[in-house]
Amino acid sequence: MHYGLTRRWALDAGFSEQEAEAIASADIGVDVQHPGGLLHPDNWGYHFRLFGARALAVRDLSSAKRTGSLQDLGVALHRVQDDVAHGWLGLLSHVLDPRIDVWEHRSRRTRRLIEERSRRMLGDVAAATGRRPVRAG
């Protein structure tokens, strides 16, 4: 989801191929640049609700709408996607279900929430920066 689906949703929102690639790369890049897990508590705000992922996503989204930063948008998307996927259990969710980050293993409800929130965020930034959807979502 952090790359393939995010890229597709960005294209649907009206971003160009190059922009969609930048957004998706920033989204998936969070896992590389800011890994979660027990050994990286400074990075938990990128991945877990209990450590501020949702509030920080709002900040990043606001910045993306104001400045047009695709990097900020990608990071905001990652935070929201993980916030929904990991829920309140956060780190414990990975212990209880090692496949928690596999899209196909998530419930339909969780996938729907992630998609709706991601598309809304992409649409908000697209509208704020003068883009128009190129195809129906």
Image (cartoon, grey):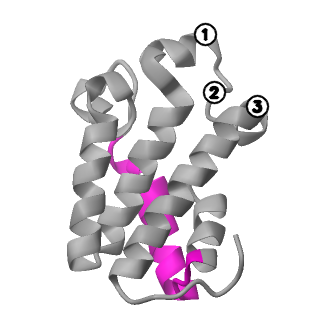
Task: Say whether residue 31 is visible.
Answer: no
Using the image, tell me which numbered label, if any, was put on residue 105: 3
Point 71% across, 77% down: residue = 136
Q: Can the viewer see residue 55?
A: yes
Q: Secondary structure at mark 1?
A: helix
Q: Which residue is mark 2?
A: 100
> Does the magenta portion include 92?
no
> Badge 3: how crowded within 10 Å, few (<14), some, or many (20+)?
few
Contact? badges 1 and 3 (CB < 8 Å) = no
Q: How many numbered circles does the render carry?
A: 3
Q: Which residue is mark 1?
A: 96
The residue at 22%/52% (across/down) is 59
In the rendered view, would you say 74 is above or below 48?
Answer: below
Q: Does dot 3 land on a helix, a strand or a loop? A: helix
Q: Are marks 3 and 2 in contact (CB under 8 Å)?
A: yes
Give, as a three-letter code, the residue at label 1.
Leu
**Which of marks 2 and 3 precedes in the sequence?**
2
Residue 116 is marked as none
Q: Position of residue 51 (x, y in %)?
A: 27, 26
